[in-house]
Image (spheres, grey):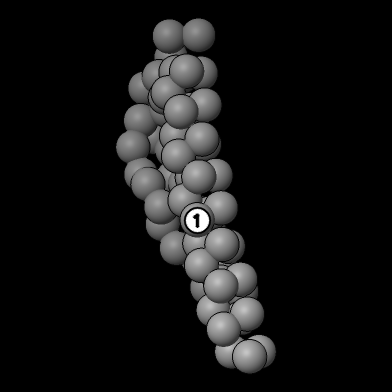
Amino acid sequence: MGDLKKKKVDYVAKTDDGEEILIESGEMSTDEQTIELLRSYMKKFYEMQVEKQKKEKGEDK
């Protein structure tokens, strides 16, 4: 298990048009660090979706 922490990991996301974005590059995290990172990504995604909905509702009026 110790050798897993030495591996490099790239976190990549794809945009709607298929372009890849490098979110983070670094060494593999522990389970707790990975969970916290995912929580922060989910929170950011939620905030972006709320903003998107607000803009769409504002344009509909």
Relative image position of residue 24 (x, y in whole percent): 37, 47
Q: Is residue 32 left or right of residue 54?
A: left
Relative image position of residue 26 (x, y in whole percent): 33, 37
The residue at 56%/62% (across/down) is 50
Q: Mark 1 points at which residue?
A: 47
Relative image position of residue 5 (x, y in whole percent): 40, 19
As drawn, the residue found furthest toward the front would be 61
Amino acid type at circle 1 is Glu
Is 4 located above or below residue 41 in the figure? above
The residue at 35%/30% (across/down) is 27
Nearest to the observer: residue 49 or residue 18:
49
Res 14 quadrant in image: bottom right
Nearest to the observer: residue 22 or residue 6:
22
Is 60 located above or below residue 38 in the figure? below
Is 37 located above or below residue 56 in the figure? above
Can residue 3 be seen here? The reply is yes
- Quadrant placement of the C terminus: bottom right
As drawn, the residue found furthest toward the left would be 26
Q: Is residue 20 left or right of residue 53?
A: left
Is 40 located above or below residue 14 in the figure? above
Relative image position of residue 56 (x, y in whole percent): 61, 81
Q: Is mark 1 on a helix, strand or loop?
A: helix
